[in-house]
Amino acid sequence: MNITQKINDAPLVYAVVPQAREASASDMDDSVCDPIDTEEVYELIRGINDPEHPLTLEQLRVTNREHIFVDDGASRVLIEFTPTIPHCSMATLIGLCIRVRLLRSLPERFKVDIRVRLGTHQSEDDVNKQLNDKERVAAALENTYLLDVVNQCLATAA
């Protein structure tokens, strides 16, 4: 990344516990429409790289399964994430990376809400407003530098 000054020099790093999802017969049948669920969404975002450290959002516990809410029937996904520190200047960028990953991966029918978890960031209302405003997101993605940083964060995400 081209981020030179780190905001959080020594983040806590957590062990990643792999959880293999057993494939069912319907998973292998292309004629069956499998619902999108929490586990599938988590698999999409867990490997996103942090913009400041060579670590994933899962390793930093910025994202976890318990804070992903999926309603396939209503075509809605809510992701709540936890910045590593309450004044994290990368919170909006992290949320943007999550949004872009889901926009690129989920069917278009899904409405995606990305939020900083309540009480985990000093500017959570402002960050949440930015992350869920279509015009602001579109403008951010027109910025080639910012899009390059997002693509770097997503480069190794599974």
Image (cartoon, grey):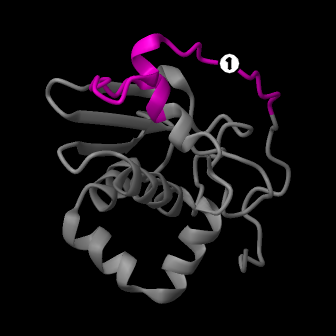
Q: Is residue 114 left or right of residue 156?
A: left
Q: Quadrant of residue 54?
A: bottom right
Residue 26 among magenta residues = yes
Q: Residue at x 42, y 86 (%)?
A: 143
At label 1, counting other C-alpha atoms closer than 10 Å, the crowd grade (few under 14, some 14-19, many 20 or more) is few
Image quadrant in which the N terminus is located: bottom right
Above or below, comparing residue 24 to residue 157 in the picture: above
Magenta residues, start to end: 14-41
Which residue ends up furthest to the bottom in the rendered image? 144
Q: Residue at x 36, y 84 (%)?
A: 142
Q: Position of residue 135 (x, y in %)?
A: 20, 72
Q: Quadrant of residue 53?
A: bottom right
Q: Nearer the viewer, residue 33 or 126?
A: 33
Q: Which residue is mark 1?
A: 19
Q: Nearer the viewer, residue 43 or 122?
A: 43
Q: Is residue 121 left or right of residue 35?
A: right
Residue 132 among magenta residues = no
* Main secondary structure type of the part rendered in magenta: loop
Q: Position of residue 58 (x, y in %)?
A: 67, 37
Q: Position of residue 102 (x, y in %)?
A: 40, 49
Q: Secondary structure at mark 1?
A: loop
Q: Residue at x 50, y 45 (%)?
A: 121
* Amino acid of disc 1: Gln
Q: Quadrant of residue 59?
A: top right
Q: Is residue 89 left or right of residue 156?
A: left
Q: Is residue 9 left or right of residue 145?
A: right
